[in-house]
C-alpha cells in the first residue's frame, strides 16, 4: 500500500500521468492531469485500488482530496472511476457542502452520477464529512468574527465556500466582507 509517491512527471495523458520515481514510471489516474507540468517534481497522494483483475493507482495533490475520495468510494454503487472525476471540476469543500446541504443537482452534474446515486451519497455521508481540522478551525474563527460584526450565520455560511482557505484569517475576513456586501 502506498501513502504517496514523490517524483517527476514524465508524461501527461487525458486521464492519467506517468510519475517517475527511482527509475520506475508509475501510471497514476488523477482528476485533472493538466494541473501537472512535465519535468516538475510532485508529491502525489496515492490510493492503490486492488481487485483480482486490476491494480490501479489513483493520485491526488492533497491529503484532503484523498481522504474524501476514500469516503466516497465506500458509498454503495460509487467506485473509484466514478468518484475521481468529481475532483476535476469541484473542490473538497464544494463536494462536502453539496452533501451536507443535500444538493442533488450539484452532485448529478458529475459524469455517471444520477439522482439515485446522489441520494445514496447524501444518505451515507451527510454529517460525517468535515474539512481538515485547520480549515474547520479557521472557518469557525471566521464565522465568530462575522457574527460579532452583526451578520447572520445563514448568510455567512453562504459565502464560506467562496472564501479561499489558503489566505490568512485577516485576509479571509476582508474577502468574506466583500462577498457579504455584494
Image: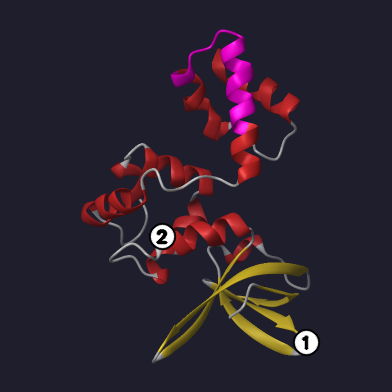
Q: Quadrant of the N terminus?
A: bottom right
In percent of the image, x 64 and y 18: which residue is there? 145
The front one of 39 and 108 is 108
Give the mark nearer the N terminus: 2 vs 1. 1
Q: Nearer the viewer, residue 73 or 104?
A: 73
- Residue 91 lies, in percent from the top left, at 53, 48
Describe residue 77's horizontal placement relative to residue 10 as left or right: left
Q: Identify the residue shown where x is 64% and y is 61%.
A: 61
Mark 1: which secondary structure? Answer: loop
Residue where numbered disc 2 is placed: 72
**Total of numbered circles in the picture?**
2
- Callouts 2 and 1 close, C-beta under 8 Å: no
Magenta highlight: main SS: helix
What residue span does the magenta drawing correspond to? 139-154
Where 35 falls versus 136 (above or below)?
below
Q: Secondary structure at mark 2?
A: helix
Q: Work out whether residue 130 can be spotted.
A: yes
Q: Is residue 150 magenta?
A: yes
Q: Residue 88, percent across and down?
A: 51, 57
Residue drawn at x 72%, y 68% is 43
Quarter of the image for the C terminus: give it. top right
Amino acid at each position: 500500500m502506498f501513502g504517496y509517491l514523490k517524483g517527476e512527471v514524465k508524461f501527461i495523458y487525458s486521464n492519467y500521468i506517468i510519475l517517475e520515481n527511482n527509475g520506475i514510471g508509475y501510471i497514476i489516474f488523477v482528476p485533472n492531469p493538466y494541473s501537472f507540468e512535465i519535468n516538475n517534481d510532485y508529491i502525489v497522494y496515492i490510493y492503490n485500488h486492488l481487485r483480482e483483475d486490476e491494480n490501479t493507482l489513483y493520485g491526488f495533490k492533497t491529503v484532503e482530496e484523498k481522504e474524501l475520495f476514500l469516503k466516497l468510494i465506500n458509498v454503495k454503487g460509487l467506485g473509484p472511476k466514478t468518484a475521481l472525476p468529481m475532483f476535476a471540476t469541484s473542490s473538497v469543500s464544494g463536494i462536502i457542502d453539496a452533501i451536507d446541504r443535500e444538493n442533488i443537482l450539484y452532485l448529478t452534474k458529475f459524469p455517471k452520477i444520477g439522482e439515485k446515486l446522489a441520494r445514496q451519497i447524501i444518505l451515507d455521508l451527510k454529517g460525517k464529512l468535515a474539512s481538515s481540522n485547520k480549515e474547520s478551525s479557521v472557518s469557525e474563527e471566521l464565522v465568530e468574527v462575522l457574527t460579532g460584526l452583526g451578520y447572520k450565520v445563514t448568510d455567512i455560511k453562504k459565502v464560506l465556500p467562496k472564501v479561499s482557505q489558503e489566505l490568512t484569517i485577516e485576509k479571509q475576513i476582508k474577502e468574506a466582507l466583500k462577498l457579504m456586501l455584494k
